[in-house]
């Protein structure tokens, strides 16, 4: 079973937790840092833009993958 790291955020006034592999958190922290955003702001942005039916964890993984593919 892969190791998942759980983090909690307040999104749209609600508290939520997201569990991702540490490598995805590292990639998302790098993206946020490059944009000079706190990680929570990046997570809120991804949450607001995700498609209905897509979990937040999935949307965050896709965001990290997209950045890796583009070299960002």
Image (spheres, rainbow, N blue to C red):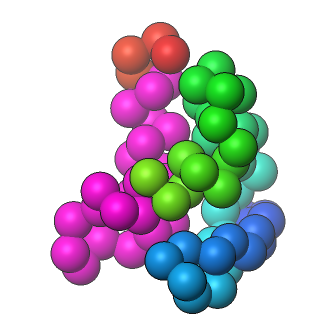
Q: In this orientation, does residue 52 appear? A: yes
Q: Which residue is farthest front? A: 13
Residue 71 in the image: above or below residue 31: above
**Residue 3 vs residue 18, the one in the foreground:** 18
Q: Residue 61: where, in percent of width, then height?
A: 48, 51
Which residue is drawn at the image coordinates 58% and 25% (left, top)?
Answer: 35
**Magenta region, mostly helix, strand or loop?**
helix
Which residue is drawn at the image coordinates 64% and 76% (left, top)?
Answer: 10
Q: Residue 8: where, in percent of width, then height?
A: 73, 74
Residue 24 in the image: above or below residue 49: above
Residue 58, quarter of the rendered image: bottom left
- Exactly how many numbered labels are in the figure? 0
User: Which corner quadrant holds the N terminus?
Assistant: bottom right
Q: Which residue is farthest left? A: 52
Q: In this orientation, does residue 27 appear? A: no
**Residue 20 vs residue 38, the one in the foreground:** 38
Which residue is drawn at the image coordinates 29% and 56% (left, top)?
Answer: 49
Residue 35 in the image: above or below residue 53: above
**Residue 67 vs residue 34, the one in the foreground:** 34
Residue segment shown in magenta: 46-68
């Amino acid at each position: 079973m892969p190791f998942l790291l759980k983090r909690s955020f307040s999104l749209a006034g609600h508290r939520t937790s997201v569990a991702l592999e540490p490598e995805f958190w590292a990639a998302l922290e790098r993206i946020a840092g490059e944009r000079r955003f706190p990680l929570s702001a990046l997570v809120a942005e991804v949450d607001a833009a995700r498609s209905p039916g897509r979990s937040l964890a999935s949307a965050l993984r896709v965001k990290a993958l997209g950045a890796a593919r583009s070299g960002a």
